[in-house]
Amino acid sequence: MITIEVTNSPLFCLLIKNTWQKLSRYYNQQLSKYDLTVPKALLLLEIAPDSGRTPGFLAKSLDLENSSMTGLLDRLAKKELIVRKPNPNDRRGFLIFLTPKGIQARNTIKSLVEEMDRKLRTQLSPEEIKVFRKVISVIKKQI
């Protein structure tokens, strides 16, 4: 059986996986104080505080299946973080809006994400950040 040490692996996919797992654990730990998870937090960040979004828009922006989006929306609605309202441009659809409680949660999440971003940026030069963005862009284009 072949084993690969993930943290020292030259394989990009394993480095990315390991990094995402660590980030996800960090954010889930921080978000658990607010009874939220990373997927719920990402969804709240995608909803503009002052305008509604369609479930399709949200699913596409988060690269989720519609069925997964429905479940997430149901759980956020149950927590009174979002509300569904009829879409005036589509009688069959609805728009997702943040509630006041949802706006407060979104602001907290945004602060957590910005804090981590600041921490990371202090460890990297502007040139390293530029290279990192380029590498991420190349990877995304290949997938």
Image (spheres, rainbow, N blue to C red):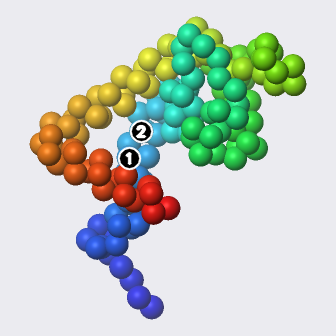
Q: Label 1 neighbourhood size at 10 Å, few (<14), some (14-19), many (20+)?
A: some
Name the residue at 41% across, 66% down.
Answer: 13
Q: Secondary structure at mark 1?
A: helix
Q: Is residue 11 above or below residue 89?
A: below
Disc 2 residue type (three-letter): Tyr
* Image location of residue 6, percent across then percent down: 34, 70
Residue that sits furthest to the right in the current view:
92
Q: Is residue 36 visible?
A: no
Q: Secondary structure at mark 2?
A: helix
* Image location of residue 116, percent across then percent down: 29, 34
Residue that sits furthest to the bottom in the current view:
1
Question: Contact, CB < 8 Å: mark 2 with mark 1?
Answer: yes
* Horizontal side, residue 117 vs residue 93: left or right: left
* Image location of residue 81, percent across then percent down: 63, 19
Task: Read off the residue under disc 2.
Answer: 27
* Horizontal side, residue 104 vs residue 17: left or right: right
Disc 1 residue type (three-letter): Leu
